[in-house]
Amino acid sequence: MDKLMNKRPVLWLLGIGTPALLLAAWWLASAGSTDTFFPPLADIVDRFRALWLFDHFGSDVLVSLRNLVLGYAIAALAAVAVGFVTALAAPVRWAVDPLIHFLRGIPPVALVPIFISLMGFGPEMRVASIALAAFFPTFIATVDGLRAVDRGLLDVAQVYRLSRRDRVVAVLLPAASPQIFSGLQVSLQTAFVVMIASEMLGPSRGIGAMTLLAQQSFMISDMWSGILLLGVIGFAANFLFDLVRRKVLAWYIGSRRLARAS
Amino acid sequence: MRRSIPAALAAVLALALSACGGSSSASSAAGDSVTTLKVGTIGIGSDAAIKLAIDKGFFKEQGLDVKTSVVANPPAGIAAAQSGQLDLTYTPSIPLLNALSNNVPLTVVAAADGYSAEAMSSKDMTKVDDTGLLVQKDSTIKRPKDLEGKSVSVPARKAQLEVTVSKLIKDDGGDPSKVNWMVLDPSSALQSLNSGRVDAASLVAPFVSKAMSQGDRLLASPGVEFFKAGAVGLWVTGNSALQKERKAIEGFKAAIYKANAYANQHIDEAQQLSAQITNNPIDVIKGGAVNYWPDKVTTDDIQRVNDSMVELGYLKTPVKLPANLVL
């Protein structure tokens, strides 16, 4: 434990230093570049400030983020709920399993045109595409997590005659939560990809649509600034996710650490 | 574990070296025998001419082996031509001007498609123009000006159809900036038009004739009204390919113009190929516009588009066309 504490600052330094170093290298290597497709990082940062911080923040950045958050939230809730029903009720499992595995084999991006013909191209189409794509990783992780719950735990719950509700909330949900969270993390990545893909069709509003448009009209600095923004948002989303996970799974992470220490 | 890192490095190095070797031997074969040119197309009906040039041996006569590959859209082709992944690529003049205005150096090699002088006086524009602006049969939209505040589908933003339809609206006294543009692939666009999700759809052959056979009404033919007679689609090359393979690219130009002339004289044969390339039944191709393959491209063809794009606000300032823009 002591050793780990001593290593901490070094690790932090590495975590912050490496990206900073890479950025510095990019800045220096691209300074004075005349290649249209690889403009200087200084130009990209300039465009970043001009485009995303003021001009298009409300009209594009917030629109994309709202779709992402809504779609992801719907997916997460639905996946855990349907996952519980599927894992706990054998008839449902038999009925739903083949359908789920059929649907999850389809690349989510390929579903966007189908959603357009079903529901037009308003924000609800984008949210629905994101939600459907993000559903499967969490759903599958939930079902697997529930199936792997220790029999002993269930037996104890039986002995104590816990109600169905208590069994779900106090026993099954916590026991499956480490798996559910790894599913949620995969879902987050999928939701992110589909957020961008869903903006390729329909009204050109959103970060993905703006970046695509910049690429197609050779505004290369704008395109790079869009890519940079997507990277930053991806990083921030993951960071937030990790914070929540650490909070919720504190008991689990702690018990793992103890197990390793002993 | 530690030992495997140098081994892996060596393997990567060997791969990289062999890759270099491969490409250098391919380009050194360009000497006196056959030069290979990689050409990007977008899989449209007018690609029949380049297909003819391959099939009839026009390229072979010039000592060329032309390998075509379909690119997603003209901007992607231009990026590939600029970086040297492709030697030549197809692009209409509008993406070309977008590229030139952002300092992407390109040279126009030859005309790929366009409108003939006779086409200007044609009675039936659907036989001439492969683009069309369509509305539902009993739509209240009677003229381009009525599109103000309406939603109009385009295959891509700030590209050919948006620019040409904007010009129609502006020339009719309307304000194109009030149009709600929607990016839709042609089949979604047609479906959205028929279900009323968009008020008008700008389509390209063969979807124009498909829409009309489903009862939609042709509001205008934006292409021919915008471009007038001359070249629209162009074969362009990047600087690196031009410097390296100038002779071969001149040969490409000669062979393409021979094929263009052949295609104009043998429309049936060209249409069969168009049907093959676009994966459409021959009846659909014959029902739509007849392609025209120009015998030259002039700076004027491009300057005209340049001026219109400035007028419509798609370019802030006119692109200064270099004197040697056309090979």
Image (tube, grey):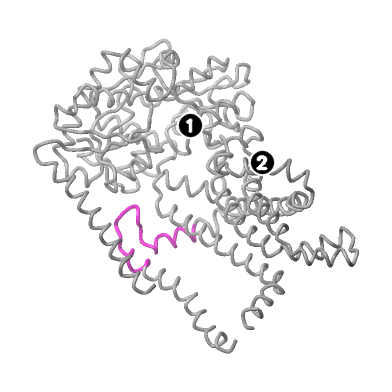
| A182 or A37, nearer to the observer | A182
> 10 Å neighbourhood of mark 1: few (<14), some, or many (≥20)?
many
Residue topped by disc 1: B166
CA separation in Å, label 2 and label 1? 49 Å
As helix, strand or loop, the secondary structure at mark 2 comes to helix
Mark closer to the observer (2, 1): 2
As helix, strand or loop, the secondary structure at mark 1 comes to helix
| B264 or A235, nearer to the observer | A235
The structure residue drawn at horizontal position 29% and vertical position 61%, both measured from the top left corner, is: B11
In this rendering, is residue B15 above or below A104? below
* Residue A47 among magenta residues: yes
Residue topped by disc 2: A98
The residue range painted magenta reads A26-50
Residue B111 spot, x, y in % from top left: 27, 28
Residue A65 spot, x, y in % from top left: 62, 54
Give the amino acid type for the residue marked by disc 2 in the picture: Pro
- On screen, residue A120 versus residue B296, left or right, reads right
| B259 or A209, nearer to the observer | B259
The structure residue drawn at horizontal position 57% and vertical position 56%, both measured from the top left corner, is: A189
